[in-house]
Image (cartoon, rainbow, N blue to C red):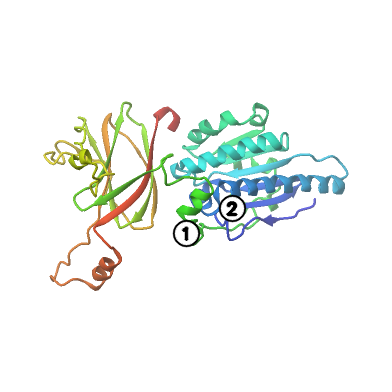
Amino acid sequence: MLINLQCYLNKHNKGLHSTSAWHYGRPLYILRLGHMDIKGLVQALAEESLLRHVLSINEEGLRCCEENTKVFGRPISCWTCLVDLEGLNMRHLWRPGVKALLRIIEVVEANYPETLGRLLILRAPRVFPVLWTLVSPFIDENTRKKFLIHAGNNYQCPGGLVDYIDKEIIPDFLGGECMCQGGLVPKSLYRTAEELENDEIRLWTETIYQSASIFKGAPNELLIEIIDASSVITWDFDVCKGDVIFNIYHSKRAPQPPRKDPLATHGITSPAGNNMQLIDKSWLLGQDYSMVESPLTCKEGESVQGSHVTRWPGFYILQCKFHSMPACATTNLPRVDDVLATLQVSSDKCKVMYYTEVLCSEDFR
């Protein structure tokens, strides 16, 4: 048997773990989707570059099929893909990443029909049905019949991975002997907002993301009404300026609609004009509303994704508020770190870009 291993890793896609090899003449491509830095890849490469990369993989697979047809003296027209989902979670359902994936599936289905011989999906976690619900309508029925899905570690049982691939070319993270490596995409490779707009991927504009300025005493609050318990609230936001504290609250009663900005009637925009405040100052924590997640401090430049499974119906409030520097407990004199941090912030203002979505409990299960 001829074995030839290649790794597709370069400075632009270090979050893309992938290995290809020949197994009984049919090319094998291995993808660690659960360990992919999806947000880093989209922000560093853009959707078009990711699409070109996937198309180049398909072209290389076809070339390998032609070469192996000559080597083995029999027709080889398709290849196998192994997808490891260990580590897949809600952060992989980042909307721009899913959008890029759907476009890639559409283009590949249209231009490379019947080139996939088998798709082996291993270690599928609980969140996999959510992803499958999103992508399966875009996959041809004949292609779906080629999918073989294993949850947990049952791929190690008879009828599992070793029935399709020899152990010497199974990756080490699946109990084999081949070594693979990779990592997160460095943020230094992320494109700027201007570059994103030039590529027509408007992550920071009116399409799906919203922006908010946060001041001392003026947090930004987002109201989400939940009808069915065990729904899943997901969020994704980038802290563009300053440090913020992220909180999630629950209330059985709806907050009053925010009052209109009196300056707006005169055509004047107030400093906090693009943020929303919902929690009334008369409300008491623990009585009128309760905290359902521990506060999370988010530093400038950080990108935060997460999810919360709701326990009760009602109204959930996602809050980002200004993070003030803590005072020194032993002296009134400012600490050196506090002074340096203050010099780096031009004003008592933070800015975040955010997106939220609610998944029903049926899809999450």
Residue 132 in the image: x percent, y percent? Answer: 53, 33
Residue situated in front as seen by the camera: 295 or 177: 295
Residue at the spot 15% in from the left edge and 66% down from the top edge: 329
For marks 1 and 2 on the same chain, the one whose residue lies earlier in the sequence: 2
Residue 108 in the image: x percent, y percent? Answer: 66, 38
Q: Nearer the viewer, mark 1 or mark 2?
A: 1
User: Residue 193, can we see it?
Assistant: yes
Pointer 1 with pointer 2, Cβ within 8 A? no
Spot the residue most to the front. Answer: 266
Residue at the spot 47% in from the left edge and 56% down from the top edge: 192
Disc 1 crowd, CA 10 A, few/some/many (<14, 14-19, 20+): few
**42 displayed left or right of 243:** right
Disc 2 crowd, CA 10 A, few/some/many (<14, 14-19, 20+): many
Q: Quadrant of residue 5?
A: bottom right
> What's the residue type where badge 1 is placed?
Lys
Q: CA distance from mark 1 to mark 2?
A: 18 Å
Q: How many marks?
A: 2
Residue 339 in the image: x percent, y percent? Answer: 24, 70
Q: State whether residue 190 is above or below residue 161.
A: below
Residue situated in front as seen by the camera: 49 or 364: 49
Residue situated in front as seen by the camera: 142 or 146: 142
User: Residue 24, can we see it?
Assistant: no
**88 displayed left or right of 359:** right
Q: Quadrant of residue 69?
A: top right
For disc 2, the marked residue is 17
Residue at the spot 32% in from the left edge and 52% down from the top edge: 351
Q: Quadrant of residue 120?
A: top right
> What's the residue type where badge 2 is placed?
His
Residue 240 in the image: x percent, y percent? Answer: 36, 54
For disc 1, the marked residue is 187
Q: Name the quarter where the C terminus is drawn.
A: top left
Name the secondary structure under disc 1.
helix
